[in-house]
Amino acid sequence: MKGKGLFNKDIQWRNEKELVKKRLEFRKELYEDKMKNSIRWLKQTHKIPRLKKKIARINTVLTSKAKSKDGNNMK
């Protein structure tokens, strides 16, 4: 997948608010694409798994950022 590394580097340096906002945008887009796909209007069906992966990557970064904040309290 071309540009995957660029996306990963981009989300690593964003703060939590921006990541949550971006995740919400991707979720809305995913929902719209799923609805279009269900009525056979979506021509670019390859977008659905890509959006799912982007959302998962953002969730991973958010989780790691949360753990790094609480890392001093963990044993």
Image: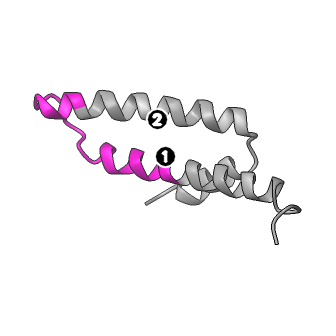
Query: Which secondary structure, mark 2?
Result: helix
User: Is disc 2 in contact with disc 1, using a CB cutoff of under 8 Å?
Assistant: yes
In the image, the segment drawn in magenta is 35-56
- Residue 52: give x, y in percent of width and height: 40, 48
> Which one is in front, 59 or 40?
59
**SS for callout 1:** helix
Q: What is the residue that sits farthest to the bottom in this orientation?
A: 75
36 up-or-down from 47: above or below: above
Q: Which residue lies under the disc numbered 2?
A: 26
Judge left or right: residue 44 versus residue 5.
left
Image side of residue 38 versus residue 58, left or right: left
Q: Residues within 10 Å of mark 1 (few under 14, many from 20)?
A: many
Badge 1 amino acid:
Ile
Residue 42, by quadrant, is: top left
Above or below, 46 against 20 in this view is below
Q: Position of residue 33 (x, y in %)?
A: 28, 32
Q: Nearer the viewer, residue 63 or 36?
A: 63
- Residue at image location 89% in from the left, 62% down from the top: 72
- Quadrant the N terminus occupies: bottom left
Total count of labels: 2
Q: Mark 2 is on which residue type?
A: Phe
**Residue shown at the point (43%, 34%) measured from the top left:** 27
Q: Quadrant of the C terminus?
A: bottom right
Q: Is residue 20 magenta?
A: no
Check if residue 42 falls in the magenta segment.
yes
Task: Give residue 55's mark.
Answer: 1
Residue 32, x across and y down, in percent: 31, 27
- In screen coordinates, is 2 left or right of 43? right
Task: Name the residue rendered at 46%, 35% in the picture.
Answer: 26
Identify the mark nearer the N-term, 2 or 1.
2
What type of secondary structure mainly makes up the magenta span?
A: helix
